[in-house]
Image: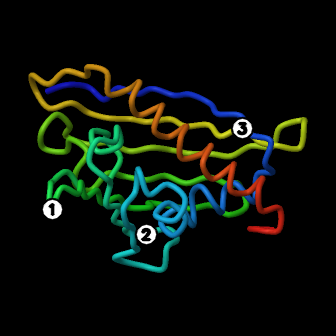
Amino acid sequence: MSSPASWNFEIESPVAVPRLFRAALLDWHNLAPKFAPEIVVSATVIEGNGGGGSVRQFNFSSGTHIQELAKNIAGVINALHLHEGALDYVDHDKYESKQTLIEGGGIGVKLESASSHIKFEPASNGGCVCKVVATYKLLPGAAVDDEIAKAKDSITKIIKTAESYLLANPDAYV
């Protein structure tokens, strides 16, 4: 049985912490299909109110890197890749959350488990830094190929898409 492994990285943004936290993390299931339809075809909260303890389902378009990630239900239905992830907790004061992959993104194929801890911290320029720590446990005999690079790229695209929307709409999420 393999031991848990992890990776981390940071993404800088000129957008203030509260706005980016709400748009890119808390409300991404509503924004993604509108502003990143090439990545997310549809998304919904299937359990809970969108906060801690909630389960969100994202339907990713074919050909995206996210369909291969340990982030949310691997399965193909009508060319959509479905991913389900639980928001284990959300701290609105500290601007952080922990999410666990429930199904998909390699669970049962390469991964035994996967989770991510995301925290937004203020930067000296008035913007913020998004810090991501992903932890996963591989199934016996499974190997990580280029999934980590793809995961980092996909998370960066999510943050940068939300950032672009917020910069173009300065009254949104204030």
Of residue 127 and residue 41, the one placed in the foreground of this image is 41
**Helix, strand or loop for disc 2:** loop
Identity of the residue drawn at 50% across and 40% down: 155
Residue 36 vs 128, above or below: the answer is: below
Q: Which residue is mark 3?
A: 129
**Helix, strand or loop for disc 1:** loop
Amino acid type at mark 1: Asn
Q: Nearer the viewer, mark 1 or mark 3?
A: 1
Specify the quadrant that holds the C terminus.
bottom right
Q: Which mark is residue 78?
A: 1
* Residue 76 x, y percent position in the rendering: 15, 55
Mark 3 is surrounded, within 10 Å at the Cα level, by few (under 14), some (14 to 19) or many (20 or more) other residues, namely: many
Left or right, 140 with respect to 29, comes to left
Specify the quadrant that holds the N terminus.
top left
Amino acid type at mark 2: Gly
Left or right, 29 with respect to 136, comes to right
Of residue 135 and residue 81, the one placed in the foreground of this image is 81
Q: Which mark is residue 63?
A: none
Q: Which mark is residue 53?
A: 2
Identity of the residue drawn at 39% across and 67% down: 43
| Labelled pair 3, 2 in contact (Cβ < 8 Å) | no
Identity of the residue drawn at 62% across and 43% down: 160
Mark 2 is surrounded, within 10 Å at the Cα level, by few (under 14), some (14 to 19) or many (20 or more) other residues, namely: some
Quadrant in the rendering for residue 173: bottom right
The CA span between labels 2 and 1 is 29 Å
The CA span between labels 1 and 3 is 37 Å
